[in-house]
Image (cartoon, rainbow, N blue to C red):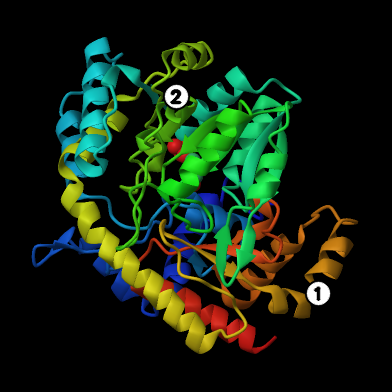
C-alpha cells in the first residue's frame, strides 16, 4: 500500500516532517526549532508540553502513516507509544555506556541484576513481591505470550479474550495457530463490563488459555480486585490458564487502582496465572525490546521456558535499568499531565463533537471513541463492500480511518482490529503534548461538521 519507493522515502519524510508537524502545531519552523533545543526540563519540571517531533526517525506512529497515507497525515494518533522525550536519566545512562565501544554477550550476572531491579520496582511501586528467580527476561511482551500459548494451547485450540481487546493479541494467535474465542464485553452507559455468563460459557474444554489485559487496551478499563478474582475463579474451575498482560500497569488515573493479578489473595488462582510486564511503554522506549514474565507456579514456569529463549540487548538493559532506578519522578510528573489530557479530550468532545461517544478511561494513555452515527452517514458498510472488489480491500473501520486521514489529517487505529465490539470504534493515543492533541481534536471536529 505504500505510496513511496524505498529510494526516495527518507527525502520525502524529511520534507513531510516539516509539513506534518507544521500542520499539527500551527507554526512548523518555530516548533521544530524549539523541539531541537528544548532541554528535558523547565524550571525543575519535566517538559511534556513542548511538541517533540519524531518524524524522520522511522517510527510507526508518524513515519509509517506518512508512508502509507502520504502527506495528508498531519497528526499520528495511532500505535501505543508516546511522543514524549524520554526521561533524561535514560539518555544519560546510554551515553555513559556508549563510551565503551564493545557490546559483546552479557553475563548471567547481568541478567540476575536486571531481574533484581525489576523485582524492586514492583515491590516499591505496587507492593508486589516477585521472586527475582521467577522472572524471565523477554525481548517484548509478545514473545512471552507466544511461548506461553505454545505451552498451554495447542494449534487449533481456542484462546479466550474479552473484547474489544488489544489488537496485537490476534497476531499472537496467528503465531501459535490458535483460534479466537471472543467474549464481547457489555457496553452500557459508556462503560465496559464483563459478560460473566458468556465468559463462563466460553470456557469449554477446547479453550485452555485466556489473554487478560489489565489495565485494558483499548477501553482503558482498570479491573478491580473483585473482577480479577471472579475471572481467576472461573479460569481455575474450567482449567483455563490466565495470561495477565499488565504492560499498561503504570498508567492509572488518580483515584483508580491497578491490582496485579499476581497479588490476588488466593494462591490457587495466582498459581494458575502467568504475568507479563514491561517498563518500556511507561518510558517511551518500547523498541528497546525489554519485557519480562513471571509466575508463582514453578511447574508452569519451567514448561514455558522450554518454548522461550531470549537474549537481552546491552543498551536496552542499560536504558531500562536507568528508568527503573531513576525514572520514578518522571512518570510521577507525567501521570497528571496525561490525566489532564484525558480531561481535555472529554471536555472537547462534549463541547465540539456531540456525535462522538466517549467515556474517560480509568487508565492507559488511550481513548476509545464511538462513531456510530458518523460511520453510518459515511456509509462505511457500502464502501467496505465495494473495496472488496479492488486490490485494496478495507474493513468498515479502515474505510473510516482512511476518510479521517483524507478529511482531517488525523490517523487513528481502526476499531475492528480490536475484535468483536470494535465495529464502530476507533482508538486514539493521547500520549502527546496538549498542543498536538488539540490540533488532532480540532481537525477532527472540523471534518465531522461537514458530514
Ligand atoms: C496490551 C499490550 N500488550 C503488549 C504490547 C506490546 O508489547 P511489546 O512491545 O513488549 O511486545 C502492547 C503494545 O501496544 C500492548 O498494548
Residue drawn at the location 31% of the way across and 63% of the way down: 255
The mark that comes first in sequence, 2 or 1, is 2
Classify residue 358 as left or right of residue 332: right
Nearer to the camera, 258 or 110: 258
Residues packed near mark 2 inside 10 Å, few (<14), some (14 to 19) or many (20 plus): some
User: Please, what secondary structure does the residue beneath circle 2 have?
Assistant: helix
User: Can the viewer see residue 11?
Assistant: no
In x, y percent, where is residue 386?
88, 64
Q: Look at the image and tell me whether residue 363 can be seen.
A: yes
316 to the left or right of 117: right
Q: Quadrant of residue 348?
A: bottom left
Q: Please provide percent x and percent y for residue 109.
A: 22, 13
Above or below, 186 against 188 in this view is: above
The vertical placement of 144 against 386, above or below, is: above
Q: Position of residue 112 (x, y in %)?
A: 24, 17
Q: Which mark is residue 271?
A: 2
User: Image quadrant of residue 446?
Assistant: bottom right
Marking on residue 129? none
Q: Label 1 CB, ligand 1: below 8 Å? A: no
| Residue 106 position in % (x across, y down) | 28, 15
Query: Quick one: which residue is furthest to the left in this view?
Result: 43
The residue that appears at 43% across and 32% down in the rendered structure is: 275
Q: Which residue is mark 1?
A: 379
Tell me if residue 84 comes above or below residue 360 in the rendering: above
Total numbered labels placed on residues in the image: 2
Secondary structure under the numbered disc 1 in the rendered image? loop
Which is nearer the eye, 85 or 127?
Answer: 127
Which residue does the image show at 34% across and 49% down from the upper left?
A: 284
Amino acid at each position: 500500500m505504500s505510496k513511496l519507493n524505498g529510494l526516495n522515502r527518507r527525502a520525502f519524510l524529511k520534507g513531510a516532517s516539516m509539513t506534518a508537524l507544521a500542520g499539527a502545531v500551527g507554526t512548523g519552523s518555530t516548533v521544530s526549532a524549539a523541539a531541537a533545543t528544548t532541554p528535558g526540563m523547565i524550571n525543575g519540571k519535566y517538559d511534556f508540553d513542548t511538541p517533540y517531533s519524531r518524524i524522520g526517525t522511522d517510527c510507526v506512529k508518524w513515519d509509517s502513516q506518512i508512508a502509507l497515507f502520504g502527506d495528508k497525515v498531519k497528526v499520528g494518533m495511532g500505535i501505543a507509544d508516546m511522543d514524549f522525550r524520554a526521561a533524561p536519566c535514560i539518555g544519560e545512562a546510554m551515553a555513559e555506556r556508549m563510551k565503551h565501544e564493545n557490546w559483546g554477550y552479557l553475563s548471567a550476572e547481568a541478567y540476575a541484576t536486571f531481574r533484581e531491579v525489576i523485582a524492586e520496582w514492583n515491590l516499591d511501586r505496587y507492593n508486589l513481591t516477585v521472586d527475582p528467580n521467577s522472572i524471565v527476561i523477554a525481548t517484548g511482551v509478545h514473545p512471552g505470550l507466544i511461548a506461553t500459548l505454545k505451552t498451554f494451547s495447542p494449534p487449533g485450540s481456542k484462546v479466550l479474550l474479552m473484547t474489544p481487546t488489544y489488537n496485537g493479541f490476534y497476531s499472537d494467535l496467528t503465531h501459535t495457530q490458535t483460534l479466537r474465542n471472543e467474549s464481547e464485553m457489555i457496553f452500557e452507559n459508556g462503560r465496559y463490563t464483563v459478560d460473566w455468563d458468556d465468559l463462563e460459557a466460553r470456557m469449554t474444554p477446547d479453550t485452555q488459555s485466556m489473554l487478560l489485559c489489565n489495565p485494558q487496551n483499548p477501553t482503558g478499563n482498570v479491573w478491580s480486585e473483585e473482577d480479577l478474582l471472579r475471572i481467576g475463579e472461573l479460569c481455575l474451575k474450567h482449567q483455563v490458564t490466565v495470561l495477565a498482560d499488565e504492560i499498561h500497569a503504570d498508567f492509572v488515573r488518580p483515584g483508580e487502582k491497578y491490582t496485579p493479578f499476581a497479588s490476588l489473595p488466593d494462591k490457587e488462582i495466582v498459581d494458575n496465572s502467568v504475568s507479563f510486564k514491561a517498563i518500556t511503554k511507561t518510558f517511551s522506549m518500547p523498541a528497546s525490546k525489554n519485557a519480562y514474565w513471571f509466575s508463582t507456579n514453578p511447574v508452569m514456569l519451567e514448561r514455558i521456558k522450554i518454548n522461550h529463549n531470549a537474549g537481552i540487548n546491552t543498551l536496552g538493559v542499560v536504558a531500562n535499568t536507568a528508568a527503573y532506578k531513576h525514572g520514578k519522578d518522571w512518570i510521577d510528573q507525567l501521570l497528571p499531565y496525561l490525566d489532564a489530557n484525558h480531561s481535555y479530550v472529554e471536555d472537547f468532545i462534549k463541547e465540539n463533537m456531540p456525535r462522538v461517544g466517549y467515556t474517560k478511561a480509568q487508565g492507559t494513555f488511550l481513548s476509545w471513541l464511538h462513531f456510530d452515527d458518523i460511520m453510518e452517514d459515511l456509509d462505511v458498510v457500502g464502501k467496505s463492500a465495494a473495496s472488496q472488489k479492488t486490490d485494496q480491500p478495507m474493513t468498515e473501520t479502515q474505510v473510516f480511518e482512511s476518510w479521517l486521514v483524507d478529511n482531517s489529517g488525523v490517523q487513528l487505529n481502526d476499531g475492528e482490529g480490536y475484535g468483536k465490539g470494535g465495529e464502530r470504534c476507533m482508538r486514539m493515543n493521547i500520549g502527546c503534548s496538549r498542543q498536538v492533541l488539540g490540533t488532532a481534536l480540532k481537525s477532527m471536529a472540523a471534518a465531522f461538521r461537514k458530514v
